[in-house]
Amino acid sequence: MEFKQEQPPINIGADISVKSFEMIEKELQEYPKAKEFNKNQLEVISRLIHTTTCFEEVLENIFFTDNAIVRIQELLKNKAKIIVDVNMIKVGLSDFYLKTYDNEVVCYINEPFTYEMAEKNKTTRSYAAVVEAIKKHKNEPIILACGNAPTFIYAAINTLLDEEVDLKNVAFLLFPVGFVNVVESKDYGKRFCEHFDIPAVIMEGRFGSSTMTVATLHATYKLIKDFDGKDKYNGK
């Protein structure tokens, strides 16, 4: 039997993006849980579903503190440093948004001093890296974005408290994925953020990823008022 070559039904990137979000918006209507979220939250949720194709996992596990999106946007507009646990997040973030809002992405995971501190203190490199990053940038607005290493969360919280950082200038995006320390670290982060009224977006449970962290930041950037007039599905 002869094999017949085919071409994709939709072959233009922008058209694919538009169609994808149209499908997500339509399918979300089938989930009663989706009605519990406001417009800004649904924009983030749609981005997370677009990244993973997982409707139930996102809807059932996503957690937002009060006014989290708006408050994180204010930090971004105030030139917040984005401290991340892995370079995958750094590489994935849009240069357009980072340059527009002058947000530097900080990742010390592969720095020689991180290896030294981790070995000295018997911690993971993620733990050592965020300790050093917070100490260096503690007097600036900070967004702590975690997509892989749960120990990053413990280190971030403990260092913020030890260094007496002004928590009004801090936000969390917590999306580590896996089995060891994952559920517990997110619970620790949630309790911390609720106790100190810190804006946070958290994917509870084992579910998460660095790509979801990137998607959340991109959705948050996109919702900033300056860009409301742009094409909703232009991929920025």
Image (cartoon, helix red, strand yellow):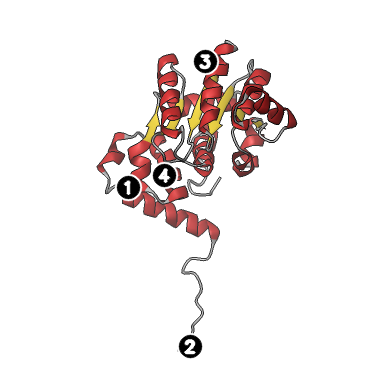
The secondary element bearing badge 1 is classed as helix
Rendering coords of residue 114 (x, y %):
69, 29
Say which of marks 1 and 2 sits in front.
Answer: 2
Identify the residue position indicated by label 2 in the image: 2
Read off the residue under disc 1: 28
Q: How many marks?
A: 4
Q: Amino acid type of disc 4?
A: Ser
Work out whether 134 lies above or below 47. above
Vertical comparison of 236 with 13: above or below: above
Residue 73 rendering spot, x and y as whole percentages: 52, 28
Q: Secondary structure at mark 2?
A: loop
Residue in view at x 41 percent, y 15 percent: 195
In the rendered image, the residue lying farthest to the top is: 164
Q: Distance from label 2 to label 3 (Cα)?
A: 66 Å
Verify CB contact (< 8 Å) between mark 4 and mark 1. yes
* Other-residue count near label 1 (Cα within 10 Å), few / some / many at <14 / 14–19 / ≥20: many
Residue at image coords 28%, 38%: 35
Q: Secondary structure at mark 3?
A: helix
Which residue was labeled with disc 3? Answer: 168
**Upstream in the sequence, badge 4 or badge 1?**
1
**Residue farthest along the bottom direction in this orientation:** 1
**Amino acid type indicated by mark 2:** Glu
Q: CA distance from mark 4 to mark 1?
A: 9 Å
* Residue highlighted by disc 4: 46
Give the crowd class for mark 4: few <14, some 14-19, many >=20 residues within 10 Å: many
- Residue at image point 51% right, 27% down: 153
Q: Is 36 on the left or on the right of 138, as rendered? A: left
Q: Secondary structure at mark 4?
A: helix
Q: Please tell me how crowded label 3 is: few (under 14), some (14-19), or many (20+) other residues with Cα within 10 Å.
A: some
